[in-house]
Amino acid sequence: QVQLQESGPGLVKPSQTLSLTCTVSSGSISTNSDYWGWIRQPPGKGLEWMGAIDYTGSTYYSPSLKSRTSISRDTSKNQFTLQLSSVTPEDTAVYYCADNWGSWGQGTQVTVSS
């Protein structure tokens, strides 16, 4: 069973860049046909898909976030990373990483506040 774990700062100031890392265990992020994504849930709202990176390193982004989002990977560490620039308080949410087979991390709360 693949396990995913998010890590990163819980508090980010407005206008800064949010950076989160997802560490994958019991599986490889380079495995053929696998996709690795980021999803978030703002307080009181539904889940929002942000983007993904596939086993070749190709990336896919939500149109609404594309201009501010970057997803990359480090295959040597079996990790993939989310960067969201120019954050505002509206980016406050629980951020999850997940794979395309239904495995999710436990989520990490990120608050944008000065």
Image (tube, rainbow, N blue to C red):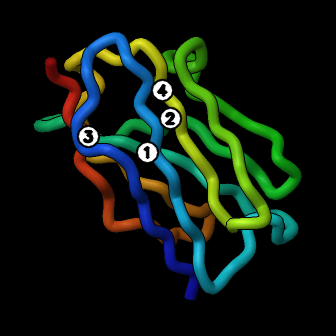
Return the residue nearer the eye: 113 or 3. Answer: 113
Q: How far apart, in angstroms, are the residues tagged by discs 2 and 1?
A: 5 Å
Of pointers 3 and 2, the one earlier in the residue sequence: 2
Give residue 6's quadrant in the image. Answer: bottom left
Q: Give the CA distance from mark 2 to mark 4.
A: 10 Å
Number of numbered tags placed on the structure image = 4
Tags 3 and 1 in contact by the CB under 8 Å rule? no
Location of residue 24 in the rendering, given as x and y in whole percent from the top left corner? 59, 71
Q: Amino acid at mark 1?
A: Ile
Callout 3 secondary element: strand
Reading the chain from its start, which is encountered first: label 2 or label 4? 2
Does label 4 or label 3 sit earlier along the sequence? Answer: 4
Q: Which residue is mark 4?
A: 84
Q: Do callouts 4 and 3 mark residues in contact (Cβ within 8 Å)?
A: no
Q: CA distance from mark 1 to mark 4?
A: 12 Å
Residue at figure coordinates x 32%, y 58% from the top left: 107
Judging by the rendered image, the residue that carries numbered circle 2 is 50
Mark 2: few/some/many CA within 10 Å (<14, 14-19, 20+): many
Mark 2 residue type:
Met
Inter-mark Cα distance, 4 to 3: 12 Å
Residue at the spot 41% in from the left edge and 66% down from the top edge:
105
- Residue ID for mark 3: 110
Determine contact: label 2, label 4, CB under 8 Å. yes
Residue 68, given in percent of the width and then of the height, sits at 53, 17
Give the residue at mark 1.
39
Q: Sequence-wise, which precedes: disc 1 or disc 4?
A: 1
- Disc 3: CA contacts within 10 A as few (<14), some (14-19) or many (>=20): many
Give the residue type that dot 3 points to.
Answer: Val
Question: Is there a contact, CB below 8 Å, between mark 2 and mark 1?
Answer: yes
Measured in 3D between alpha carbons, the distance from the residue under mark 3 to the one under mark 2, in whole angstroms, is 15 Å
Q: Nearer the viewer, mark 2 or mark 4?
A: 4
Vertical relation: 100 (above or below) 48: below
